[in-house]
Amino acid sequence: MNIDVRVGGARNQFAAQIVNIQSSTFESIDGMFIGDETTDFYEGLLAGVAFAYQLLKTTSPKITDNYLGATISYISGEKYKK
């Protein structure tokens, strides 16, 4: 499983599921976004959330908890350097 792979064509599969989201869930999620970021930002966010979703589906909660925290730390300290 790679975290730094763009979702690309799979995005269409995810996007098609939007019709299955309950309106209250949609409104709740929509409220978490400011909405003024670039397409590149959302593409990166999508890759990260897709990675976390795969991790949740394929590993135990303890491993997921450790890996997500460690991944955030790794990206912050190693990959995201200005």
Image (cartoon, rainbow, N blue to C red):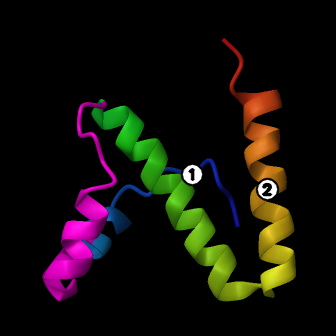
Q: Is residue 68 above or below residue 4?
A: below
- Image quadrant occupied by the C terminus: top right
Kind of residue indicated by mark 2: Gly
Q: Position of residue 52 (x, y in %)?
A: 61, 67
- How many marks can you see? 2
Q: Position of residue 13 (x, y in %)?
A: 29, 75
At horizontal 62% and vertical 47% (from top left) the residue drawn is 4
Q: Residue at x 19, y 68 (%)?
A: 27
Q: Residues within 10 Å of mark 2 (few under 14, many from 20)?
A: few
Q: Disc 1 and disc 2: Cα gap in Å? A: 19 Å
Horizontal arrangement in the rendering, residue 43 relative to residue 69 (left or right): left
Q: Is residue 49 left or right of residue 8?
A: right
Q: Main secondary structure of the magenta part?
A: helix
Name the mark on residue 69: 2
- Which residue is more in the foreground, 28 or 80? 28
According to the image, label 1 marks what residue? Answer: 5
Q: Is residue 27 above or below residue 73?
A: below
Between 74 and 28, the one nearer to me in the picture? 28
The image quarter in which residue 36 lies: top left
- Numbered range of the magenta stretch: 15-37
Label 1 close to label 2 by CB (< 8 Å): no
* Secondary element at image label 1: loop
Labelled disc at residue 60: none
Q: Say whether residue 18 is magenta.
A: yes
Name the amino acid type tagged 1.
Val
Q: Secondary structure at mark 2?
A: helix
- Disc 1 crowd, CA 10 A, few/some/many (<14, 14-19, 20+): few
Which numbered disc, 1 or 2, marks the residue that appears first in the sequence? 1
Q: Residue furthest top?
A: 82
Q: Position of residue 24 (x, y in %)?
A: 19, 80
Residue 77 among those drawn in magenta: no
Q: Please name the residue shown 30% across and 30% down the image.
A: 38
